[in-house]
Amino acid sequence: MSQIFQPNAAATQTLSNSKTLSANNTTANVSLFSITGTVRVLKLYGVVTTVLGSNHTGAYFNLYDQSARVNITLSTVGVTLSSFAAGSIIMKTALAATLATIQSNAAGAIIEPTAAQGVVQSEFVAVKKTGAVTEIDYTYTTTNTPTTGAIQFFIEWQALSADAAVAAL
């Protein structure tokens, strides 16, 4: 008798990955998490842990399969996190055609859903490309030489296939 994989919604896992940002007058693609199989991503966000450089622009999340980048958040302009202090946040809160949500902690603030009884963060399904390393990346541009700062990234996910896995890169 063969076993049939049955996703377990109770099996939500959370993983984090801290990244020091040091691009030098360029656009940088920072590898965050590798994806195996098919996973449901419930939350994807980053919290600044060390103040970011004075020029940190065009930031967005994407799925990279070693040949193409698929937007997780809007990439055409990205968002600006220049000089964001520790405790500031970037997160996916809407469809891929929408900019990531950012909030500096320079003043008290809330982030809430766009509709009553909605959720703040927007989930999506990520599928690994056959025969290729597939990863979730954070992309940003800087004119600093080099830039500085650090962000701790988090992913909350569930398995949708028998081989599903997420690992920090």
Image (cartoon, rainbow, N blue to C red):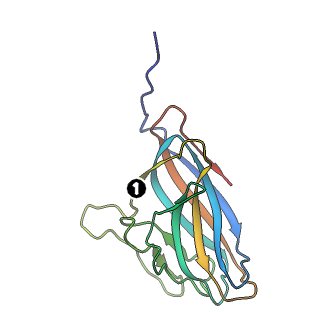
Instruction: Write down the quadrant of residue 123 in the picture.
Output: bottom left
In x, y percent, where is residue 81? 56, 82
What kind of residue is marked 1? Answer: Glu
In x, y percent, where is residue 150? 68, 73
- On screen, residue 110 versus residue 163, left or right, reads left
Residue depicted at 64% across the width and 84% down the height: 142
Furthest residue in direction top, as rendered? 1
Quarter that holds the C terminus: bottom right
Q: Nearer the viewer, residue 82 or 108?
A: 82
In x, y percent, where is residue 67? 57, 58
Quarter that holds the N terminus: top left
Q: Nearer the viewer, residue 153 or 135?
A: 135
As helix, strand or loop, the secondary structure at mark 1 comes to loop
Q: Which residue is mark 1?
A: 123
In x, y percent, where is residue 138? 58, 67
Total marks shown come to 1
- On screen, residue 128 versus residue 85, left or right, reads left
Residue depicted at 55% across the width and 42% down the height: 130
Residue depicted at 59% across the width and 87% down the height: 82
Instruction: Write down the quadrant of residue 20 in the picture.
Output: bottom right
Furthest residue in direction front, as rendered? 67
Residue 127, above or below 104: above
| Label 1: how many Cα within 10 Å (few below 14, some 14–19, many 20+) | some
Q: Nearer the viewer, residue 129 or 163?
A: 129
